[in-house]
Amino acid sequence: MKGNHSRCGAFLAAAFLVIGIALAAAGCGRRGEDDLILAEDPAMAGSSGTGDEAGTGDTCSGEDPEEEPVCVFVCGAVMEEGVYSLPEGSRVIDAVEAAGGYREDADPSYVNQADYVSDAQKLVIPTREEVKALEEQAPVRAGEEDAGDGLVNLNTADESQLQTLPGVGPARARSIIAYREENGPFQDPSEITKVSGIGQASYEKMKAYITAP
């Protein structure tokens, strides 16, 4: 009997030892998984932080806002009439090119192609026939009792009256007014060639329409 009790005790001790080892192994495995998760968390947080920093950099471009464009209505003897948006500082030739260029019957010399265009400007390109008709309708100055009758007085005309002259748009009309305000009244119609953007060719087209005491 004593021998049986000894064998039973040894068996129980071995069983408890196996259970203890199994429990210890399970606990180590669980701690390893927790440690692995904890070890991965900082890396994941770091990855998230990097993404946030990259997004902040994308929104701060530091670029200056673009300049406001000017809208010009180009019509008459051009290939495609319409309203065109052009960069600020564009000239008449740029507006014409945006409209597809001159038609074959256009008179490009009627307008100052180097003149600046302004926002909301209406740019009319006449045909050669239209220019000829305008020239034929010009009053005959020789022998007139009143040389100023029916003519635009360069010293008193406002911006809208000046725009009735051949080749004079809003920008050029303002230049004429600015010139006389700075330099005094025009002494002779030919003095208009001193205004920026108006050359001899432009003067020849408008001289029959203007007067200056």
Image (cartoon, rainbow, N blue to C red):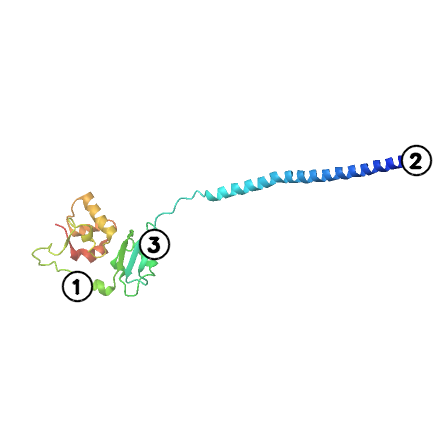
Give residue 26's position: percent from left, percent from top. Answer: 73, 40
Give residue 205's position: percent from left, percent from top. Answer: 20, 58
Callout 2 crowding tier (Cα within 10 Å): few <14, some 14–19, many ≥20: few
Q: Which residue is mark 2?
A: 1
Q: Which residue is mark 3?
A: 85
Amino acid type, callout 2: Met
Give residue 78's position: percent from left, percent from top. Answer: 30, 62
Q: Secondary structure at mark 2?
A: loop
Q: CA distance from mark 1 to mark 3?
A: 35 Å
Q: CA distance from mark 2 to mark 1?
A: 148 Å
Q: Secondary structure at mark 3?
A: strand
Q: Residue at x 20, y 52 (%)?
A: 160
Which of the labelled discs sits on residue 136, or is there none?
1
Q: Residue at x 26, y 59 (%)?
A: 124
| CB within 8 Å, label 2 to label 1 | no
**Quadrant of the drawing holding the N terminus:** top right
- Left or right, 53 with respect to 68, comes to right
Q: Earlier in the sequence, mark 2 or mark 3?
A: 2
Amino acid type, callout 3: Ser
Q: Quadrant of residue 13?
A: top right
